Image (cartoon, coloured by chain):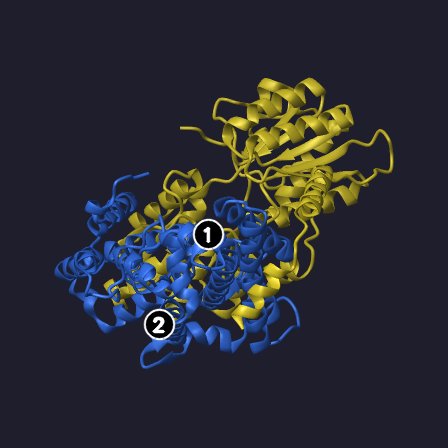
Chain colours: A blue, B yellow
Amino acid sequence: MVKTLSSSATQSPAASPDLPKARRWRAASWAPVIVLVLLCAIITLINPNFLTFGNMVRISQSAMIPLVLGIGATFIILMGSIDLSVEGVLTLAAVILSMLVLNGANANDYGLLAILAVLAVGACVGFINGVIHVRLKVPSFMTTLGTWFIGVGIANALLGGMATRINDPWIRGLAIERFMGFPWGVWVALACLAIALVIQNYTRLGRYIYALGGGEELAALSGISVAKVRIAAFTIAGVFYAVGGILAAAQLGLGNAQIGNGRLFTTVTAVVVGGTALSGGQGSVLQTLVGVLIVVVLSNGMVLMGVPPSVQIGVQGLMIIAAVALSIDRKLMKIVK
Amino acid sequence: MVKTIVTAGTRRSLQRRSFLKGAAAIGAAGVFPAIITRRGHAADMPTVVNSIRSLSNPYHATWNAGGAAFAKSVGAEYVTLVTEGNSEKGIADIKAILAKTGGNCAINIDPNDSPDARPIVEACKEAGAYVVTQWNKPADLHPWDYDPNYVAHISFSGVPYGKAMAEALFKAMSGKGGIVALGGIESNVPAIERKAGLEQALKDNPGIELLDFQVANWSETEALEKTNAWLTQFGDKIGGIWAANDGMGLAAIEALRADGRAGKVPVTGIDGIQLAVEAILKGEMAGTVAWDPFWQGGMGLAIGFAAKTGVFDPAKEPKEHREFYGTGVTITAENAQSYYDSNIKAEPSLDWKDIWGRVSGQIQYN
């Protein structure tokens, strides 16, 4: 029961192709990839430097954080919920990390332990999100809005408005040291993607998340513990945001309470542009990868193409609408909210 | 593993009602310290009050430290009000402190937004308190229209300092080559002024070419991404980077570092935050300008306090003492160490009686 439900609710390229419905969806779900390829082609025509290896590395550097955040948010959006706590968890993770590793403000030097602690903090905040959302029946929008502010608030209180410089060579190495030409942070982000793919496709939890997004009542009736799935999904998302916080701190070489500013918008945009439906049940973390690349390539490309700064934000808006409009299958939608 | 965590969470029956009660209690407790006060020594000693946007950035945190230092120097009660970016809260808190002190106070305020200055000044005049505003006020609101209570307005012109930083950058590049520039939010007055200063310097130095100007909205993340794209577009043609504030400049340095070029391409910022001064000491940054928020937080109070206690009569002061540009401190490799030692390592010691010492001209409105 669950199996048929989840496969018919998926829109991912991996969805079973023997159903005629799934085949029709396939074209629409490839739309973001087509948009990405077109975008790259146009930018290359105007500025051939775009396709150099150096620029690919820089794009991957810009994409690594949105990718990790987007992966976390994808699980939540697949359930039809929303998670606004991205910036809160990221900021808290970056600030705590900056205070636990070798830094310019205190004598701590916990190295790997600090990373584990930060991941635990992310899991905790996600877990709290899930418990409040499920047990107190507070809508995910309000719950995570609250934890967003709490996260930033704690980060503020910890640092008192100052920034802490990170001196730990391992953390800084994530952004500076390279393996096969790409910074280690990019490999970390790809590892996260692989883990997320496994969770999504090969664990019960992953399939349950799709089931919940496709129709929660049906999922509950077929014996899925909705509460457990929701709490687990929020917890996992929290861990991914914490990874994002570690990468952000590594990239800027510091932790401060403003490090997360603007990340929520990029994250949700990337997930939705990738073709994951805000209504839940349709999408995948691989599509989020495409969405992240569209957003990052676009902002990189606009500088390369010499688009005036005052026009850039408008072009970004147009691209978001275009990408989403192309990836929607209108035949299946009766109601649009 | 995930499974055990989840079952542990769901099995624990969270008592909803008691949880809500607890949350309500925490919320109510949070209301009380909205105005944090310390008991003063003498009953008739005016209270000194700083009203600022938040304590979550280094700039205002230092501002607050300056205010506390001044209050300690005269033995007055010190109050910090935080608007958290909310104009209504800012104005309401001012009215509350006026009522509490009966107007016996000197207020130093960085209004959340320009229009807020008018109701605040009017409330202070009515209560008999003395007020100094900084950065934001409407152009047609003048201290001399509210004698003697509206003592002064202090601001900093971005033009000369944007220009000074551009010149420091050109000097580090030996006067020739290409630069890229990172601007703040396009509609912000400081962003516009600092950019105008850069343009003036470019006009005076024909050997320097502006390769591109991008708006990074004061954001470190955006500055990092713009710089990354520039490294692709211009590569070795980039001889220097001018940034409209330190945060963006430091992010540009991180982009250079990932490219193995930190310290080879000079970068300038503005604001004088600690990390920027440290970057100058390391040779990665070519310069910054310190507005000295410690001075702003302390001297804004000192001026109002002096007027309130009758040291001078605001109505008799010239206009250039009522609406003036303060003086920023230009920091380059030459004076970075001494600035670091006297302002960052140790708490700065300022002469709070030298109230007009940093006046550098009357504010001009176009």
Q: Which quadrant of the rendered structure holds the N terminus of chain B?
A: bottom right
Nearer the observer: mark 2 or 1; the answer is: 1
Indicate the quadrant where residue B208 lies.
Answer: bottom left
Q: Give, as a three-letter code, the residue at label 2.
A: Asp
* Mark 1 Cα shell of 10 Å, populated few (<14), some (14-19), many (≥20): many
| Residue B30 visible in the picture | yes
Residue A18 placement (x, y as % from top left): 19, 65
Q: Nearer the viewer, residue A77 or B61?
A: A77
- In space, the residues marked 2 and 1 are separated at their CA atoms by 34 Å
In the displayed orientation, state which residue is furthest to the left: A45
Quick check: B101 above or below B234?
A: above
Residue B358 placement (x, y as % from top left): 59, 41
Indicate the quadrant where residue B261 lies.
Answer: bottom left
Residue A290 placement (x, y as % from top left): 27, 62
Q: Nearer the viewer, residue A322 or B199?
A: A322
Q: Give, as a three-letter code, the residue at label 1.
A: Asp
| Residue B335 visible in the picture | no
Kindly identify which residue carries mark 1: A83
Q: Chain of mark 2?
A: B
Q: Do the dots labelled 2 and 1 sit on one chain?
A: no
Kindly identify which residue carries mark 2: B259
Q: Which quadrant of the rendered structure holds the C terminus of chain B?
A: top left
